[in-house]
Each structure stands twice: as structure tokens, then as C-alpha cells.
Image (cartoon, grey):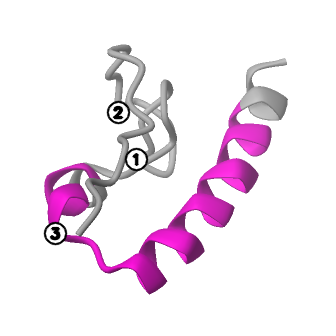
């Protein structure tokens, strides 16, 4: 199986109000489970991460 490329940008900071990383928008649990995530769940999570990043940027302004 193909390895899932992590969205991590080495800017780990989980201080957002929802507990999302300010760098990649994942939760700590999602970061820990990243290597074992199924392709179906990965696709859903990637869409969620896009939305979270937009929300994080909006909250920062």
C-alpha cells in the first residue's frame, strides 16, 4: 500500500480553540493515527483539513 504523505509542515502548535494544529489543522489524535489511516478515511480527512485551514486563517485575522 502507498504511504500517506503527511500534511505536517513542522510548525506543530495545538493552541487553537478547537485543538487543531496551527500548521496542518489536524488534532493530536489524527497526527498519532496518520500512518494507520484507511484510504477512505484519508480522503474525508483531507477535505476536512482544507476547511479547517480556511477557518484557522479566518480566525487569525
Vertical arrangement, residue 36 with respect to residue 50, above or below: below
Which mark sits nearer the N-terminus, 2 or 1? 2
Residue at 42% across, 19% down:
9
In what element is the residue under mark 3? helix
Estimate the x, y position of residue 36 in percent, counting from the top left: 16, 69
Apparent side of residue 34 relative to residue 46 in the rendered image (left or right): left
Q: Residues within 10 Å of mark 1 (few under 14, many from 20)?
A: few
Residue holding disc 2: 14
User: In the image shown, does 32 or 43 lie closer to the viewer?
Assistant: 43
Residue holding disc 3: 36
Q: Residues within 10 Å of mark 3 (few under 14, many from 20)?
A: few
Please say if the residues under marks 2 and 1 sit with CB atoms less than 8 Å apart: yes
Mark 3 or 2: the one toward you: 3
Please say if the residues under marks 1 and 3 sit with CB atoms less than 8 Å apart: no
User: In the image shown, does 18 or 24 lie closer to the viewer?
Assistant: 24
Residue at 69% across, 35% down:
56
Q: Residues within 10 Å of mark 2 (few under 14, many from 20)?
A: some
Estimate the x, y position of residue 55 in percent, counting from the top left: 76, 44
Q: Quadrant of the C terminus?
A: top right
Residue holding disc 1: 19
Assess whether residue 54 is covered by the magenta stretch: yes
Vertical arrangement, residue 20 with respect to residue 37, above or below: above
Assess whether residue 34 is covered by the magenta stretch: yes
Q: What label sits on residue 38 in the rendered view?
A: none
Estimate the x, y position of residue 24 in percent, counting from the top left: 49, 34
Amino acid at each position: 500500500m502507498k504511504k500517506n504523505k503527511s500534511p505536517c509542515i513542522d510548525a506543530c502548535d495545538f493552541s487553537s480553540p478547537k485543538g487543531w494544529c496551527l500548521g496542518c489543522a489536524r488534532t493530536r489524535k489524527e497526527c498519532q493515527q496518520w500512518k494507520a489511516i484507511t484510504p477512505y478515511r484519508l480522503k474525508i480527512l483531507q477535505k476536512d483539513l482544507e476547511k479547517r485551514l480556511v477557518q484557522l486563517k479566518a480566525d487569525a485575522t
